[in-house]
Image (cartoon, rainbow, N blue to C red):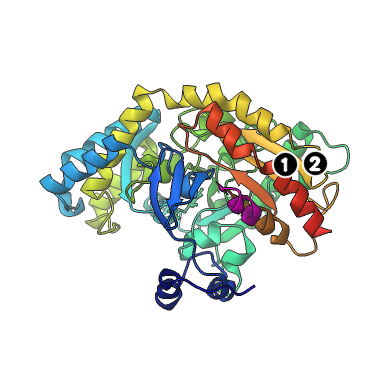
Amino acid sequence: MTVQLTNMQTRDVEALLHPYTNAVTHRAQGAHVIERGEGVYIYDNTGKRFIEGMAGLWCCGLGFNNAELVEVAKAQLDKLPYYHLFAGRSFEPAIELAEKIKDLAPGMSRVFYQSSGSEANETQIKLAWYYNNALGRPDKKKIISRVKGYHGVSIVSASLTGLPYNHKSFDLPVDRIHHTATPHHFRGAHAGETELEFSKRLATELEQMIEAEGPDTIAAFIAEPVMGAGGVIVPPEGYFEAIMPVLNRYDILCIADEVICGFGRTGEWFGHQRLNMQPTSISMAKQLTSGYAPLSAVAINAEMADVIENHSGEIGIFGHGFTYGGHPMGCAVGSAALDIYMREDIPAKVRAIEPHFRNHLMTHKDHPLVGEARQIGLLGALELTPGGNAMFSQPGKVGAHLATRLVEHGVILRAAGDSLVFCPPMTITEGELDELFAPIGACLDATLHWAR
Ligand code: PLP
């Protein structure tokens, strides 16, 4: 359907190429122009209010107008709007934030900054390669990621991502990146297989992949504790407990991509703590600044830090770094965000509201369009199916239709393929959750009617 575009929408289509957007339908329908935010709400440029069930892009954990973060950003811009960490320079906000990250992530020894999650994972792979070169293991370079994992869009991070539209038409993945199975019991289990049996089988399949490739060629395994953009896939019982011994047996680094799960989202400070994953390094972004400034961080353990630091001494430099990595304003905002998470005990808040969130999701689990409802902390999904665990003939269409209907009812959620995913600000109240879920049943009914 073609609509008459407003002046702003016309300017938008003539000036922008939008990420993750079908440019042809966008040209016909026009942009949804957002103007301001308040708590868990955003307002568009017609003044209409929407409840934001995705915290933007899984990032605004403290909602959309936290005055403390805004003040800290302004103060830092007044004092030192830019500096860098190259060539041994430093500034206190970067040091302070790294100290706080280390306190929250026991076992981590050094922090390296970038601006985005993609850059964090790009850094992770370069560190794994640098580390193995330093150890005289030049062949130990392959990385194992997972189908449906999401790790970003730069050349290597998009290669780590296990979703078709991130590879197709971009000539990806690059070599040395392999994908093992998605830990999704609902879709991946054999008939009658329990979650524990499924987890053990996936660990066996991982081990078979390592053996087939050659253990001396595998540098690292990367995983989100809970897959986010792949559809909020909560791993089955015993998953990381089965995976970890395999990695340890073959001396393979374990990278936790905590870009979504970090800082309370699962009800623990980090998702790996809730899911019993033991990382050698951690990627963080998004809620690190509650989305208020572009900043990401990679934390590495002492063993990696020693090897990398010593190697930089041998070859003369650690030749990696981004102009905006550890931007002073980002670090100041990140430091303030972590103070607020600690002061308000955000992980405990998430655990307290989790049952209410779960009840809402589970209300819809028997809807004819819903195959599975799943949840952990304040992350959730309704997996849409034409029946049982079958797939729709045109993946993504039904999910997109449902998300569009919800917008008409003042609710912003996102379809990850045919999963309707939820990731509200962690400050959301029970009443606001009721509001978020209020139109879901009616929109599921209308979408079922449309799909048939
Ligand atoms: N890793 C995970 C788990 C993510 O969810 C994302 C983004 O959604 C990224 C990495 C990439 O982050 P960015 O979009 O900041 O590059």
Q: Which mark is drawn over residue 441?
A: 1
Residue at the limit of the structure toward the right, as seen here: 191
Assign a secondary structure to mark 2: loop
Residue 275 percent location from the top left of the image = 58, 31
Residue 236 percent location from the top left of the image = 70, 35
Q: Which mark is drawn over residue 431?
A: none
**How many numbered discs, if any?**
2
Question: For this view, does 246 lie left or right of residue 59?
Answer: right
The secondary structure that most of the magenta stretch takes on is helix
Q: Which residue is mark 2?
A: 367
Query: Which residue type carries mark 2?
Result: His
Q: Which residues are magenta?
A: 403-411
Does any portion of residue 79 appear in the rendered image? yes
Q: Nearer the viewer, residue 269 or 180?
A: 269
Question: For this view, does 249 lie left or right of residue 104?
Answer: right
Q: Residue 111, located in which quarter of the rendered image?
A: top left
Residue at the limit of the structure toward the bottom, as seen here: 14
Q: Are marks 2 and 1 in contact (CB under 8 Å)?
A: yes
Residue 313 percent location from the top left of the image = 23, 50
